[in-house]
Amino acid sequence: MTPDVLDPAVDRESTSASDSPQDVQARRRKRITWIIGLVVVVGGLAWLIHHRIASQANQGHFGGRGGMMGGPMPVSIGKVGTADVPVVIDALGTVTPLATVAVRPQVTGVLVKIAFKEGQIVKAGDVLAQIDPRPYQAALDSASGQLEKDQATLAGARIDLARYKRELQEDAVAAQTYTDEIATVHSDEAAVVADKASVEAARLNLDFTRITSPVTGLVGLRQVDLGNLLQANQTQEIVNVTQMQPMSVVFAVPENDLSQVLDPVHQGKKLSVQAWDHGMTKLIATGTLSSLDNEINTSTGTLNMRGLFDNADMSLYPDEFVNIKLVVNTLPNQIVVPGAAVQNGPSSNFVYIVNPDHTVSMRTVVTGPTDGNNIAVMKGLTAGETVVTDGADQLKDGAQVLLPGEKPPAQFAGAGGMHAGSTADRCARISGMMKGATGTKAERLAHMYARLKCGGSGPKSSPAS
């Protein structure tokens, strides 16, 4: 027996009859929502495809990384030259005076005179201060008087001794008397010697009341005032005097570099030492290597060395930190390029050579010592070649470049003949394109607008999406 088949129309009618109006309305809203979502997705995909096609077209017109508007990339250049390149060892140094003296009193007394001005240059032997000399002058006078008295006593004893000697020969005096007089003379001679020592000590103390500078140098700030009672050998100094000329700089060289220093030193060569400021922008002074320490510092693995400088202009100041360049050798007639031209590759250094047809070629180089802003090239370049010094990060091998002072070639007329016509026409066309440009395209158009010197800052471009 054949099963009954339900008519779909009858089924829909029965279903519709059984559904409430609220269910029918809900299903209708759901279908509308799906349709709207599908339209949004399709529209979004269409916009994305169109945007990518337009971007690719713009990149084709404007040349991508190769330069503006499909043209050459503006760069800065430098020439390969030759120069004598010094081989240097860099180090940190401390300006260390050859003599720094803390001037202290050697006798006790009241300070009655200060004979220097703070910051003054004084010579060795110049009077710096004066202690009241009167007590020490009196002590010297007393010692001198005692010396004269004992000298007179000695003279009388010697006369008596001579008389006793004659009388002894005539048996007019006892031998004991003569012997006693000899002892008296010796005693008076010893007293005179002691008196002379007392006079010298008193005179020395009197001299100590005049406090003088032991070295030629720069006077610091005074630490005592007039009227102060100074004690002999007190801990508080009167003033410090620092020798300024010549001046030395002590610096440390790693033990791995010692062979570069010891070889020329043992040959009797005088190595040049340069003192630079903190930023390595100003050469402060040039001197010579004067001495080396006698042992390596095991905690740092370095050897201390001393460089000596005339310091005629007082540019080196005590305890100042300076950058040191110790010149251990000079390489004559070396190939040099500006340091900005050398690029760091994954396996080697390279430069971009500018060819006569205004294209660049990437060339691997072997670099040597650095001299300021220049780098010695041991292999890879010849004198007279032209290298790119700025803009190399936007280049690749074979790329065209625009040299300083040159204008873009007229044949690069991308974006619908942008380079055709007068400058005013080209500026007007670029200005119109900038109104709707975004992102990288807007930047390149703005760069082109500025290169043509169209004037002003150009129209406002749309914000980058």
Image (cartoon, grey):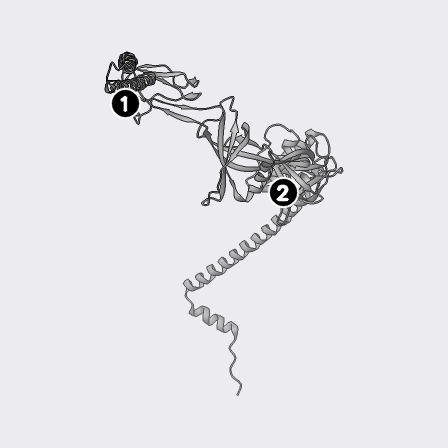
| Residue nearer the viewer, 460 or 139 | 139
Residue ID for mark 2: 343
| Badge 2 vs badge 1, beta-carbon distance below 8 Å | no
Residue 12 shows which numbered tag? none
Residue 97 vertical position relative to residue 354 in the rendered view, above or below = above
Residue 439 vertical position relative to residue 204 in the rendered view, above or below = below
The local crowd at label 2, few if under 14, some if 14 to 19, many if 20 or more residues have their Cα within 10 Å, is some
**Could you tell which of marks 2 and 1 lies nearer the N-terminus?**
1
Residue 362 image position (x, y, % from top left):
69, 44
| Residue nearer the viewer, 413 or 402 | 402
Disc 2 versus disc 1: nearer the observer: 1
Q: Quadrant of residue 82?
A: top right
Q: Secondary structure at mark 1?
A: loop
Q: Quadrant of residue 79?
A: top right
Residue ID for mark 1: 231
Q: Secondary structure at mark 2?
A: strand
Residue at the extreme right: 357
| Residue nearer the viewer, 327 or 389 | 327
Look at label 1 and name its amino acid.
Gln
Q: What number of labels is visible?
A: 2
Q: Is residue 101 left or right of residue 79?
A: left
The local crowd at label 1, few if under 14, some if 14 to 19, many if 20 or more residues have their Cα within 10 Å, is some
Q: Is residue 215 left or right of residue 201?
A: right
